[in-house]
Image: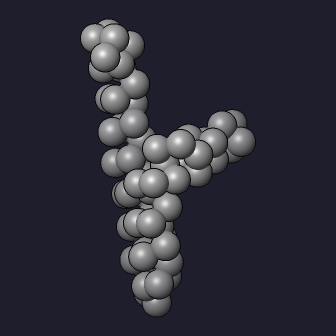
Amino acid sequence: MKKYLDQIFYEGLGKTIYLPIEKLINKINNSLFKKRLIIFTKIIYFVVALTIAICLFFYKL
């Protein structure tokens, strides 16, 4: 399962959208805040990617 999740976040759209945000978050020194922020951005990115995939499936853009 981890292999598939890594594929979502680190390939394709995730490489251009998610990775730059993760690099900025990793510069934060507070580890608890950094961990929560990474989880929050992963959830937001996953929802956005899923929405785009569903729209492409149903509307055939």
Q: Residue 35 at x, y = what percent? A: 48, 70
| Front-lying residue, 7 or 13 | 13
**Residue 36 makes an appearance in the image:** no
Foreground pick, 15 / 38: 15
Residue 52 location (% of width, % of height): 34, 29
Please tell me which residue is depicted at 41% across the width and 54% down the height of the picture: 17
Q: Residue at x 37, y 57 (%)?
A: 40
**Residue 7: percent from left, percent from top:** 63, 42
The image quadrant of residue 38 is: bottom left
Q: Which residue lies at the image location 58% right of the left edge and 51% below the top edge?
A: 10
**Residue 10 relative to residue 58: left or right:** right
Relative side of 11 to 28, left or right = right
Q: Position of residue 11 (x, y in %)?
A: 58, 46
State whether residue 26 is above or below residue 54: below
Q: Nearer the viewer, residue 36 or 61?
A: 61
Corner quadrant of residue 58: top left
Q: Is residue 38 visible?
A: yes
Residue at x 50%, y 78% (from the top left corner):
26
Q: Which quarter of the rendered picture does the C terminus lie within?
A: top left
Query: How are the residues colored?
Result: one colour
Give the vertical position of 46 relative to 37 (above or below).
above
Comparing 19 with 46, the one in front is 19
